[in-house]
Amino acid sequence: MPLGTDTKQYETPNHPYQGERIATEHSLVDRYGLSNKEELWRAQSELRSYRREARELLGQAQDDEIVQRRSEEFLGRLKRVGILDETDELGDILSLEIEDILERRLQTVVYRNGLANTTQQARQYIIHGHIVIGDQRHRVPSYVVDVDEEDLVDFDENSPLADELHPERAEGQ
């Protein structure tokens, strides 16, 4: 694909003016500190693709070896990133909500781990390069954090925010 001809990685709503949908979108954008609705639509498209793949796998013969392998790989991928619990099965993917996807973003994990006072502040810390996972700096707020990486999220040791007495640090960190 030539440069500059990237396709959108999300679908926009079919009906642009639905008051209830717009209100729900605004509350999600505010709660998760998203920069715009495009980020929300991207997460919704990701959720739709998960459900689509789950329906496709559920519709095939479960005793087929290839279908079983694909199902295990798909479930393993969703469990690794924390969207599903270890006990969940293929059918549980159909009951996922958009919040399940948004909770796995680096921005939300930084906020939930108490490294920032708000989701917007978490976004700023990430974009400005103050956040690392292990020893790897991440500057993308939408990065999906694996379950085994979650405890490694912290301030960069060279960041001024690594000092616990920094005025911008959240209380009790």
Image (cartoon, rainbow, N blue to C red):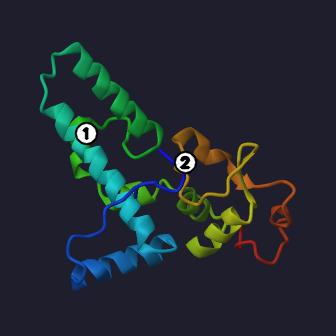
For the residues labelled 1 and 2, the Cα–Cα distance comes to 21 Å
Residue 81: give x, y in percent of width and height. 47, 42
Q: Give the residue at mark 2.
A: 145
Work out whether residue 92 can be spotted. Answer: no
The residue positioned 20% from the left and 32% from the top of the image is 57
The residue positioned 38% from the left and 35% from the top of the image is 86
The kind of residue tagged 1 is Glu
- For this view, does 82 lie left or right of residue 120? left
Residue 50: give x, y in percent of width and height. 30, 45
Q: Nearer the viewer, residue 166 or 74?
A: 74
In this view, the mark in front (1 or 2): 1
Work out whether residue 74 can be spotted. Answer: yes
Marking on residue 53: 1
Using a 10 Å C-alpha cutoff, classify the residue at mark 1 as few (fewer than 14 neighbours), some (14 to 19) or many (20 or more): some
- For this view, does 160 lie left or right of residue 12? right
Q: Which mark sits nearer the N-terminus, 1 or 2?
A: 1
